[in-house]
Image: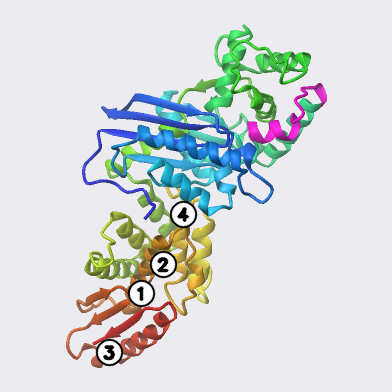
Amino acid sequence: MHLFHLPSTTPETFAAIDLGSNSFHMIVARIENNQIMVIDKLKEMVRLGAGLQKDKTLDSDTAERAIACLERFGQRLAGFVPGSVQAVGTNTLRQVRDPSFLQNAEKALGHPIEIIAGREEARLVYLGVAHGIDTGDQRRLVVDIGGGSTEFIIGQRFKIFNRESLHMGCVSYSQRFFDDGIISKQSMKKAILAARLEIRPIRGTFNDDHWKLAIGSSGTIRAIRKVVQEMGWSEKGISSESLKQLRDEMIEQGSVDNLKLKGLSNERLPVFAGGVAVLSAIFKSLDIRVMQVSDEALREGLLYEMIGQYQDEDIRDKTIKTFSERYNIDKSQARRVKSSALQLLAQVATDWKMQSQDFTDLLEWAARLHEIGLHISHSSFHKHGAYILENADMSGFSRQQQHILATLIRTHRRKINPDLFVFNSDELQQNVMRLAIILRLAALIHRGRNSASKPKLKFYADNNKLCLVFPEEWLDEHPLTKAEIKEESAFLKQIDYELTFE
């Protein structure tokens, strides 16, 4: 099952991998006194975003380059236990519509790869920056320009107040406005205008009325800082004046091929103009005069996230609690369903090879939120609930994890459509279907919403043959439950499972 889970003991070494639209990064570190001690860093310019075609697949050269890079990363990770490595895909991988590529990528790396939403990327970026720069109690704006998206976050210490992700980045804007290699006053003006239009809807929330300090992170902004400092235009960070000098110099030199700037590497050169245009628009739109630069970002955020999970500070549990409160879920009913679901899973986990904590967590979260759709309407509330979880911003959850939760809630009652169980592998599809069956049975047992204790059931599984054993005469004394289990048996036949009961 391709989900992040914790091994039984805390690993000595961790690795975080950022599969971005421009470059792939890996950081290997030890954790000492709650601080990251970096052991190794690897980086390769894969330019994934440049290889994304109109049909949302990757061209063969880009795909081969990406897989080869991941194989090299995988060699470095030999011996790392499951759960000590977390790899995430961002903007371009969010768009790729080729399941086989992700399967090949995971095989090459030797560890799961999770695709995260833009606002989740923003949260992790802020987590990394917040650990890297101590700005006291000042509210700060954090900006991270990637290859295909740019993240904006306002926070104070480790608390986030606002976060957004916009579809603009150094790769996409370099392709869109500087594809011919010409850097003219007109092309730079068009690129900046386009970025300002993209920023316009969030300007009122992210302008300098809401923060005291601006911080930039990741490759594009670090590259710009290096150039303006080595060219002698700025002593610290990036000033608006130094950014203007940089644009003027680039326009005067006239083309990407002729660009000669101190501190600018050859590998950054093809996407530099687009990055400068995006950052210029951000400065203009949000009234930034000076921006500090952080050397920590998404990768470090991932590492600190893993530390938190080992210290029982899993952000996902907090997210489930927040959703439960926001949507006024009946917590007593949720606890009853959760308890029965986990008891049923424990009895078949060995036979179904589902002993991983991943399955327990997913089933528990789904049980706690299975009635979330009632906030909208009682009619088809399982469909409403699935829609909420499929589309909401859920801190700590990858897109795949959200999809699994949405599927469990969508299929926890009424008829089962087997076409709803669409996942990257047959194994994952089977496991999610089995979790759905358990959740269905637990919800059915507590359909009467009675606080009285339920009988201890025995649950057996032999592949797709299931058997529920009730205490003697209990079913005869509860004819409604007996009728509902008969109906459930018919529903399960639709997905080729045979349920008997006695």
Q: Quadrant of residue 460?
A: bottom left
Asked which secondary structure carries label 4, the reply is helix
CA separation, marks 3 and 4? 39 Å
| Residue 159 in view of the camera | no
Q: Which labelled disc corresponds to residue 465? A: none
Residues at marks 1 and 3 touching, judged by CB atoms closer than 8 Å = no
| Residue 308 in view of the camera | yes
Residue ID for mark 2 = 370
Asked which secondary structure carries label 3, the reply is loop
Residues at marks 2 and 1 touching, judged by CB atoms closer than 8 Å = yes
Q: Is residue 352 above or below residue 106?
A: below
Q: Amino acid at mark 1?
A: Ala
Which quadrant holds the C terminus?
bottom left
**Where residue 277 sits in the image (x, y, percent)?**
70, 27
Residue ID for mark 1 = 443
Residue ID for mark 4 = 400
**Where residue 272 sits in the image (x, y, percent)?**
65, 24
> Is residue 58 toward the left or the right of residue 477 in the image?
right
Extreme-top residue of the structure: 232
Asked which secondary structure carries label 2, the reply is loop
CA separation, marks 4 and 2? 18 Å
Residue ID for mark 3 = 478
Asked which secondary structure carries label 1, the reply is helix
